[in-house]
Image (tube, helix red, strand yellow):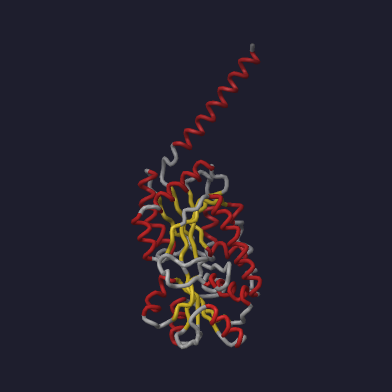
Amino acid sequence: MRTKTAGTLLAAALTLGMASAAQAQQAYPNRPIKMILPFAAGGAGDTFARPLVQALSQSLGQPIVIENIVGAAAIIGTQVAMRAPPDGYTLLMVSNALAIGETMSPKRGYVLTREFTPITQLNALSLVLVVNPKMPVKNTAELIALAKSQPGKLNYASSGVGSIYHLPMEHLKSMTGIDIQHVPYKSSSQARMDVIAGEPSMMMDALATMKGQITANQVRAIGVASLKRTETAPDLPAIAETVPGYSGDAWLGFMAPAGTPPEIVNKLQQEIANVLARPEVKAAYRTQDAVPIASTPAQFGAFLKDEIEKWGKAIHTAGIKIAE
């Protein structure tokens, strides 16, 4: 009788515990959510996070507070997020910079895919390869042919070693076998000015930033770094049309500390997807030459793995010095 009673009490306690856990998850969120951006205020992270946060706060019924925690190439903010409880109340915005950092910063103190669980990719931001108009090339095939006829003589600019404007060019070099020289700058703006002046003769840059210069014929657009043509500039060919499989676009996404309940992760993904499907959000993204993605957690996890491997290979192939 006692054994039966004890067993009944244990079963009741387990049932109550599961019910309480389920109720807690159903009640999520019941307090403000923190969104950590390991990037400087005013950058691309802010540009896309703030409109999303407004709509997401309304749909979730709780305020979402953005915290820009910068430093050490996004490492400091990522470490702060890593130490947060896995309860869905701390989110981390991630980007290609963090995927690159998996190779460039071996002492960062975390493994992105181990310390965090993917929620969703937010968007893809189109990059474009441009050349000075005096260069005798009008497309990717002609650029590759010219570079192969003059190995080591053509130069390209970027905003710095290991940046998203540097590595896509190294990726292109490794896929095509061309030999062009990297000229790093401390800022994208100075790199742009010199490409417009004629030397270095080319660079990879954000399409949204370069559109004005392209329209004014200050630079010539060769191709976008997407796997296919972008919706906002359909007349520009994708580099992948000439170099199959090539991709180098920038992107943003969200992760949560590892161990965050799947029910919460899925709820966040679905709510973000609902916001990204709104016509006004799509229109706002188009003005920035960005495409909403809203991938599932599994899809974003697979994408992250591919990105980390791709940029790691580009870094090692280029012989870029890794931080000690």
For this orientation, the residue located farthest to the left is 280
Relative to residue 307, is residue 90 depicted above or below?
Answer: above
Q: Quadrant of the C terminus?
A: bottom right
Residue 198 drawn above or below residue 33: below
Residue reaching furthest to the top: 1
Going by the image, does 240 lie left or right of 59? right
Q: Position of residue 208 (x, y in %)?
A: 41, 70
Along the viewing direction, whichever of 272 and 135 lies nearer the viewer: 135
**Image x and y of residue 91, in percent:** 48, 51
- Say which quarter of the image contains residue 28: top left
Please name whichever residue, 197 or 235, is drawn nearer the observer in this view of the structure: 235
Residue found 45% across the figure and 73% down from its top = 236
Q: Position of residue 224 (x, y in %)?
A: 48, 71
Residue 109 left/right relative to 54: right
| Picture residue at 48% right of the left edge, 82% below the top | 138
**Is residue 257 placed above or below 165 in the rendered structure?**
above
> Which part of the image, by quadrant, shows the N terminus?
top right
> Can you say whether 32 is above or below 248 in the image?
above
Estimate the x, y position of residue 14 in percent, counting from the top left.
57, 27
Please give the count of numbered marks on the rendered protein: 0
At x 57% / y 45%, what residue is drawn? 259
